[in-house]
Image (spheres, rainbow, N blue to C red):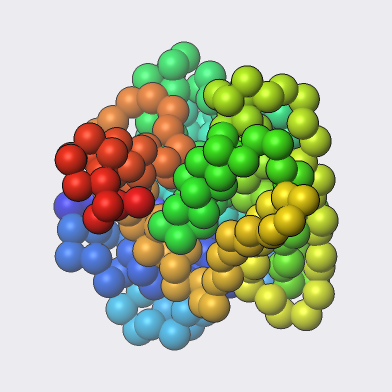
């Protein structure tokens, strides 16, 4: 049984908690919110509408005490970048593995995050792009950039009006994947603009537009429900269990192996 703690009980965090409760191989042992949250002190079940979740929601200020008491194997963090950085240091020192779905990190913060597992010998999955669908889009965009390296590229992302970071972490990661594709074809320093829109209650949409002189290609992904984030989190928890090191969702989902197997299977027409 994998013992799991959830940090961050916004809309996505609540779906993640529900998803963990549905797993036969997982036990939700703690739920943590920010010190000023109105959820503090309430029973998790009343927040997520599940009577089985008889867990009192605790403050992130008490993280060390909670970890010592509940001994989780993994912590899923969907809080905010500042809080996550603090949590990651505490959890890494305690050798607790993490799945980080938080976005909005600076490049320096990401470098620091990636160094923690090698310093403290725990495991971290950094997953601002936690769904199978968006990771497939990233792989396809990387391939498209490699093949169509003389085309022009643009990313448009749309999220609900309450999302604080813009552009999204996923859009930034998309651009980096496309840059990798371009570099592998010998093209460097090609600008990939990102257009970020914050409006209404949109869960999330990412669109890659690829413009040639005579044609246009679009690759897009849209989330209809936050349930898909919970599914991705569960996959990441299973993957990171008893591992050490720093990983991303491309390792969790093993999409590169799938593509490699297709190309080398002798049945390329079934894969491409």
Q: Residue at x 73, y 50 (%)?
A: 212
Q: Residue at x 18, y 58 (%)?
A: 25
| Residue 61 seen in render | no
Depicted 7 relative to depicted 160: above or below: above
| Residue 90 seen in render | yes
Q: Nearer the viewer, residue 75 or 265?
A: 265
Residue 167 x/y as whole percent:
77, 51
Residue 69 x/y as whole percent:
36, 45
Depicted 109 relative to depicted 267: above or below: above
Give the residue at the far front of this rendering: 214
Q: Quadrant of residue 10?
A: bottom right
Number of numbered markers: 0
Residue 225 located left or right of residue 161: left
Residue 98 x/y as whole percent:
43, 40
Residue 210 x/y as whole percent:
69, 52
Q: Residue at x 38, y 25 (%)?
A: 245
Q: Residue at x 55, y 38 (%)?
A: 147
Residue 265 located left or right of residue 122: left
Q: Nearer the viewer, residue 99 or 129?
A: 129
Q: Nearer the viewer, residue 43 or 192?
A: 192
């Amino acid at each position: 049984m994998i013992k799991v703690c959830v940090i961050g009980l916004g809309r996505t965090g609540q779906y993640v908690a529900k998803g963990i409760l549905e797993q036969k191989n997982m036990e939700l042992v703690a739920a943590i919110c920010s010190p000023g949250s109105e959820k503090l002190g309430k029973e998790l079940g009343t927040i997520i509408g599940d009577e089985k979740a008889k867990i009192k929601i605790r403050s992130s200020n008490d993280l060390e005490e909670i970890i010592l008491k509940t001994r989780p194997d993994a912590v899923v963090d969907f809080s905010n970048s500042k809080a996550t950085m603090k949590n990651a240091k505490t959890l890494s020192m305690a050798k607790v593995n993490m799945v980080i779905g938080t976005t909005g990190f600076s490049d320096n913060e990401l470098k620091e995050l990636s160094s923690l597992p090698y310093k403290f010998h725990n495991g971290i999955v950094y997953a601002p792009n936690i769904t199978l669908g968006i990771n497939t889009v990233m792989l396809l965009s990387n391939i498209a950039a490699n093949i169509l390296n003389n085309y022009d590229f643009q990313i448009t992302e749309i999220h609900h009006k309450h999302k604080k970071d813009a552009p999204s972490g996923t859009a930034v990661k998309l651009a980096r994947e496309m840059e990798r594709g371009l570099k592998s074809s010998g093209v460097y320093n090609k600008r990939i603009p990102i257009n970020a829109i914050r409006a209404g209650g949109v869960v999330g949409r990412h669109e890659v537009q690829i413009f040639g002189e005579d044609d246009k290609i679009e690759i897009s992904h849209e989330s209809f429900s936050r349930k898909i984030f919970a599914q991705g989190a569960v996959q990441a928890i299973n993957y990171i269990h008893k591992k050490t090191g720093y990983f991303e969702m491309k390792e969790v989902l093993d999409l590169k192996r799938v593509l490699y197997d297709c190309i080398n299977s002798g049945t390329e027409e079934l894969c491409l």
